[in-house]
Image (cartoon, rainbow, N blue to C red):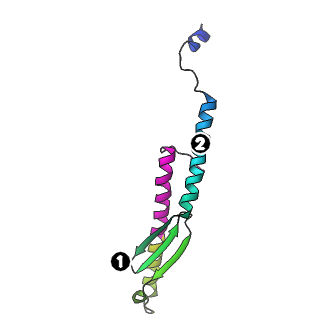
Amino acid sequence: MAKKGFQGMGGGMPNMNNMMKQVQQMQKKMEVLQDELNERELETSAGGGAITVKINGKKEILAIDIKPEVVDPDDVEMLQDLMIAAVNEAIRSAEEMVSKEMSKVTGNVSLPGLF
């Protein structure tokens, strides 16, 4: 009886082949998007534009621009702090961009280790 009740519940297991196809399609879309995101460039700044950092989607720093007026040999620590702030903001922006774009493909499904 238990067997008959189980079969009679309707719905059953989803079609695994169909599910696998959907996962493969999502994976292909994510790979294409990841390649596109790796090429995108973002620009962030710190100190009111005193330091500007350009970064790509792979979180590689492409350029750093330092305004001459912030280079004070008597206050190297301030320059270092501005550099740290600008680079950290660039990294945060790149991570946010990648996460936002990937969630459009995954529908906010958590897929650890894929990107």
Instruction: Tell which circle, 2 or 1, labels the residue nearer the N-terminal end.
Output: 2
Q: Is residue 78 visible?
A: yes
Q: Are marks 2 and 1 in contact (CB under 8 Å)?
A: no
The answer to whether 11 is drawn above or below residue 73 in the figure is above
Can residue 115 be seen by looking at this rendering?
no
Q: Could you tell me the amino acid type at mark 1?
A: Gly
Of the pair 22 and 61, the residue shown nearer to us: 22
Q: Secondary structure at mark 2?
A: helix
Q: Quadrant of the N terminus?
A: top right
Distance from Cα at disc 2 to Cα at disc 1:
44 Å
Q: Quadrant of residue 93?
A: bottom left
Residue 97 lies within the magenta run:
yes
Q: Is residue 96 magenta?
A: yes
Disc 2 designates what residue?
25
Q: Residue 55: x and y, percent? A: 51, 69
Magenta extent: 88-114
Query: Which residue occupies 47% across, 59% down?
Result: 97
Q: Quadrant of the C terminus?
A: bottom right
Check disc 2 and give the amino acid type.
Gln
Pointer 1 residue: 48
